């Protein structure tokens, strides 16, 4: 039984505002502040684009490059003195670059509601237009913070997707579909390899250890999988003809609108792994797929991916992807070398197939 409150305690309580009213007013103030901040960001992004476009037009008209540079320097001195460091020479050059790589005002207008000026400053210095548009659109769809964007770029997300291995024309079509219709494809979602160094696994371990580590670090694993994934089940039981089979991990992807079955393998990919995953997918198709969902797809995560074996089995026709996982992050240059080699090989194979047809 609680003791009666003292006179002093009652006096303090009487001075406090009603809890429900305080909470409501806090939500109201926070909501308005957020809306104002978004509106200010949108207007600033539009202004910076217009400033960059106008300067670029004058600089490009100059016959000598050094004369154009002097114009920007002079503008930076005058504008920063009047309007602050946001219009310094350095920032004016960011604006010029912004207008140079995002030439279409309609695209900028569509993006400025989701991306901040800090996002754009990071994106405009990605030289490859396909790579830049890939990060721009996934940043928009996934509502990435600038820190997440930096992490995705430094982790070479684009180079790890199947999209990067496609001919430029096909890759451009998928990015344009994402921009116009928010249409995500498996080639935009799945990647190879997956970087799982955050699991902290060393030396020898079992498949169950790998699965346990993923569950412990589920939030980090979902970030590595990418935007749109939701965890559904672990060790999903499937009974066929009285025999029980267990799928390691089951996810749902909101953008693809389909279940994603994940099978973990300690060793290299083996042809028998295809049959096992096909059984999982057919069972999910029959028993778990909802009427408004696309057919389930499978992801076999293994220590090594045998390129020719995967190619001969034509796994994608069965809705299956194979990817390797790396438990230690290699040095940046080695990662770049490996991924660029893989991209070159994949593009060469696709071009060879096109010539045959």
Image (cartoon, grey):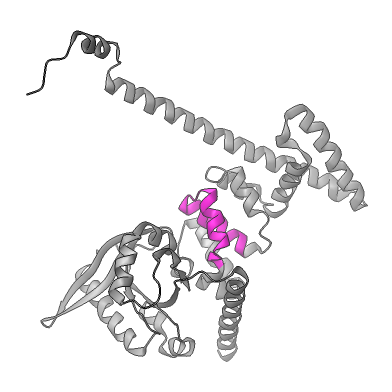
Identify which residue, 5 or 101, lies in the foreground: 5
Q: Main secondary structure of the magenta part?
A: helix
* Whole-percent x, y for residue 353 in the image: 55, 87
Q: Residue at x 63, y 52 (%)?
A: 122
| Residue 289 seen in the current view | no
Give the answer, above or below, for where 11 lies relative to 283.
Answer: above
* Whole-percent x, y for residue 172 in the image: 58, 67
Q: Residue at x 43, y 30 (%)?
A: 31
* Whole-percent x, y for residue 267 in the image: 38, 83
* Whole-percent x, y for residue 200 in the image: 40, 66
| Residue 159 seen in the current view | yes
Q: Residue at x 21, y 75 (%)?
A: 246
Give the answer, above or below, for where 33 lies relative to 196.
Answer: above
Q: Is residue 136 magenta?
A: yes
Question: Viewed as shown, does residue 52 lie left or right of 7?
Answer: right
Residue interval drawn in magenta: 131-158
Can you say which quadrant of the picture contains the C terminus?
A: bottom right
Q: Is residue 227 magenta?
A: no
């Amino acid at each position: 039984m609680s003791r009666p409150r003292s006179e002093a305690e009652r006096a303090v309580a009487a001075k406090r505002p009603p809890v429900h009213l305080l909470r409501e007013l806090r939500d109201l103030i926070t909501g308005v502040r957020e809306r104002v901040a978004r509106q200010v960001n949108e207007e600033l992004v539009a202004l910076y684009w217009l400033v960059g476009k106008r300067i670029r037009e004058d600089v490009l008209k100059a016959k000598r490059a050094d004369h154009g540079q002097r114009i920007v320097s002079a503008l930076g001195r005058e504008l920063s003195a009047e309007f602050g460091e946001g219009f310094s020479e350095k920032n004016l050059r960011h604006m010029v670059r912004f207008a140079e790589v995002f030439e279409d005002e309609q695209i900028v207008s569509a993006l400025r509601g989701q991306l901040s000026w800090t996002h754009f400053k990071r994106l405009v210095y990605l030289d490859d237009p396909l790579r830049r548009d890939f990060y721009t659109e996934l940043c928009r769809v996934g509502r990435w913070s600038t820190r997440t964007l930096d992490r995705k770029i430094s982790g070479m997300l684009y180079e790890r997707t199947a999209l990067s291995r496609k001919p430029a024309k096909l890759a451009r079509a998928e990015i344009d579909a994402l921009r116009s219709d928010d249409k995500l494809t498996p080639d935009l979602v799945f990647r190879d390899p997956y970087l799982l160094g955050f699991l902290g696994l060393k030396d020898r371990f079992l498949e169950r250890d790998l699965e346990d580590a993923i569950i412990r670090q589920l939030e980090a694993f979902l970030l590595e999988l990418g935007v749109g994934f939701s965890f559904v089940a672990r060790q999903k039981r499937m009974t066929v003809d009285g025999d029980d089979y267990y799928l390691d991990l089951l996810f749902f992807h909101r953008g693809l609108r389909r279940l994603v079955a994940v099978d973990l393998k300690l060793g290299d990919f083996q042809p028998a792994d295809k049959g096992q995953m096909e059984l999982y997918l057919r069972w999910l198709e029959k028993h778990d797929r909802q009427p408004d969902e696309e057919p389930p797809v499978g992801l076999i995560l293994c220590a090594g991916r045998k390129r020719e074996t995967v190619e001969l089995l034509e796994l994608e026709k069965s809705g299956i992807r194979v990817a390797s996982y790396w438990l230690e992050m290699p040095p940046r240059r080695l990662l770049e070398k490996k991924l660029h080699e893989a991209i070159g090989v994949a593009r060469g194979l696709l071009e060879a197939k096109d010539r045959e047809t």
